[in-house]
Image (cartoon, rainbow, N blue to C red):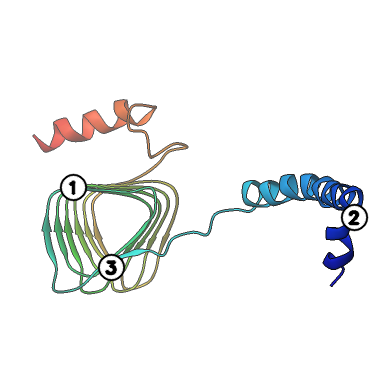
Amino acid sequence: MFSKSKINEPGAKEAEAAKPAAPATPAAPVAETKPSTAPKPKPPASVLSSDLHITGNLKTSGDIQVEGTVEGDIRAHLLTIGETATIKGEVTADDVVINGRIVGRVRGLKVRLTSTARVEGDIIHKTIAIESGAHFEGSVQRQDDPLNPGRGGKAAANPAAEVKQ
């Protein structure tokens, strides 16, 4: 629009070029600040379908929902065991929701056994909830830090292992 008059006047062109440069400099740090302060969106839970059979260990800092069969240890942030799922191994997570079957030790800050849960093994927890109808065979032990077996739980876990042998 005004470019015709600016092209004809070299002094005005330089002044106009300097004006956008000054506001652009503060705008650039604002754009850089937004990504650093905005939290990253949480990725969705990984789902292992009911027709999936895994032999081996699973480890993630995210969430896992298991509907199939896993023969191995699982470590996650939030672990949901579906009604059709069977886990044979140790389960370790901040939050564990058990709807299916686990044969092995469960370690979690918050452990919840729903009415369809079937657990054969020890549960080491900070808080636990067991709904009516859940099937559980094993021992329950409360620890302030159940995710780290070396702290406070090691001495308590060894006598139980000796009794089993």
Q: Which residue has dot 2 on it?
A: 9
85, above or below 119, in the image: below
Labelled disc at residue 133: none
Tell me the amino acid under the disc marked 1. Answer: Asn
Determine contact: label 3, label 1, CB under 8 Å: no
Tell me the amino acid under the disc marked 3. Answer: Ala
Q: Nearer the viewer, residue 89 or 28?
A: 28
Q: CA distance from mark 3 to mark 1?
A: 22 Å
The image quadrant where one finds the C terminus is top left
In front: label 2 or label 3 = 2
The earlier-in-sequence mark between 2 and 3 is 2
Labelled disc at residue 57: 1
Q: Which residue has dot 3 on it?
A: 117
The image quadrant where one finds the N terminus is bottom right
Provide residue 16's location: percent of width, then percent of height.
Answer: 87, 53
Provide residue 30's location: percent of width, then percent of height.
Answer: 74, 49
The earlier-in-sequence mark between 1 and 2 is 2
